[in-house]
Image (cartoon, grey):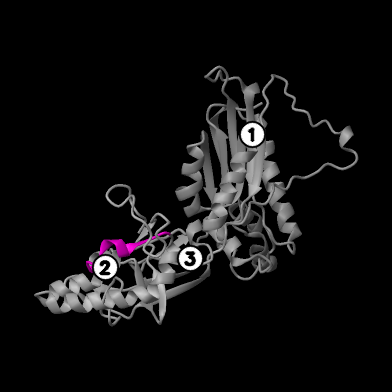
Amino acid sequence: MPVQSGEYSEMVCFLHPSELATVQCMSCVNLKIPVSQSFYCSPMCFLDAWKTRVKSHRHAANKAKQTTTGGQQALRRLRSCGSWPDFSSDLLLGENALVVEREGKVWFKVGSSKTYEPSMDDVGFILRLECLAVDHGKGTQLALVNITVTDAVINFPPRCPCCRIKFGSNRKSLNIKPHSSDGLTFNVLSYNILADLYTCGGKYGHCPKWALAWEYRKQNLLQEIIEYDADILCLQEVQSDHFESFFKPELIKRGYSVTYKKKRTEEYTALTVIMSYLYASDGCATFYRHDLFKEIMKYELEFDQRAQLAVEDLKPELKHEGSIRLMKDNVALVVILEAIRNGSTNDDVHSRICVANTHIHASPELPDVKLYQVADLVHGLEKLPNQRFLY
């Protein structure tokens, strides 16, 4: 463990007396070895000394076992350090153990919890996870130890620069300056963030597995989205559980309000510790700055429900094929927003905007389905000007 300020703040390294100690061996402390021998100037110094120090630990452990009265007391004392004469499977690590030996290798204990997030101190090292089921009432082991060993921890890769679309040589003829009849200007970001549901199956074999892992991608995605500093965010392929646990709370903290539409079809994602199955789907999420806009209404479109009406009008011999081809569970989310001026809205229809967010069917082999879904969405949008809330 790192040396704490206080009683031992001025202790020096046992092997390098000219260096101040930064690490203390808790095995030495628990086995009552002279405290001066428990300090080292760095983790690597401690690791280099371990093979010789383990003999002192075992000697002290044997001595404690012989002189301590009560077998259980001796066992608790031996379990609280990392230098046992015999590492049998029925002995469990104590909370204070810092170093243990497994299959002839020395391991530093870095945590005892359900999750562990590697830090820069772990770079270059292999991580080993040991899981053991124990009956707390009887103190007996219920199953074999489950062991997982990782590859060496690598440095967190640098973030890739944002890829922006460049206009061609005719960009001078395009009027891309912000303009508005009533002075209302805003910027919009549309981003397909690739739901974790779709990263399996080898479709992205060109990408390293660690780069596809959601725990890695989510922070990069959030940071990139924040850096765009958009007033309205239209995100696609937002996985339902990730929306609730990550994007929604994170972006609400940053001043956004949100509306979300997910697909009705769910897919299996995980098996919990209580043997229940978890399912999730993806969908479209529209975020907008709550100090700039107020939601007036929203319109949700499920393309398969609309396609069902078209399929019913087909000839009987075409209905089966038409159903398979057209009824895809893509969705669209349309939101009517009203601009907030001077801290309030004024029910001015000219300050209202319509934001349509959708993810049409992805397969390049079904261009007719893509066209049908776009036409269906546009048809619905064309009806909006006739509504009282938008001109």
Is residue 332 at all visible to an observer of this figure? no
Specify the segment rendered in magenta: 31-41
Q: Quadrant of the C terminus?
A: top right
Q: Residue at x 62, y 30 (%)?
A: 387
Q: Residues within 10 Å of mark 2 (few under 14, many from 20)?
A: some
Residue hosting label 3: 268
SS assignment at label 2: loop
Badge 1 amino acid: Cys
Q: Which of the two residues, 210 or 350, is positioned nearer the viewer here? A: 210
Q: Residue furthest front?
A: 18
Dot 3, crowdedness within 10 Å: few (<14), some or many (≥20)?
few
Residue holding disc 2: 94
Closest to the camera, between mark 3 and mark 2, is 2
Residue shown at the point (42%, 62%) measured from the top left: 16
Q: How many marks?
A: 3
In the picture, the disc for residue 206 is none
Rendering quarter of residue 337:
top right
Q: Position of residue 310 (x, y in %)?
A: 66, 55
Given this view, does label 2 or label 1 mark the residue nearer the observer?
2
Q: Position of residue 84 (x, y in %)?
A: 28, 77
Please tell me whether mark 1 sits on a helix, a strand or a loop.
strand
Tell me, yes or no, if residue 258 can be seen here.
yes
Residue under pointer 1? 354
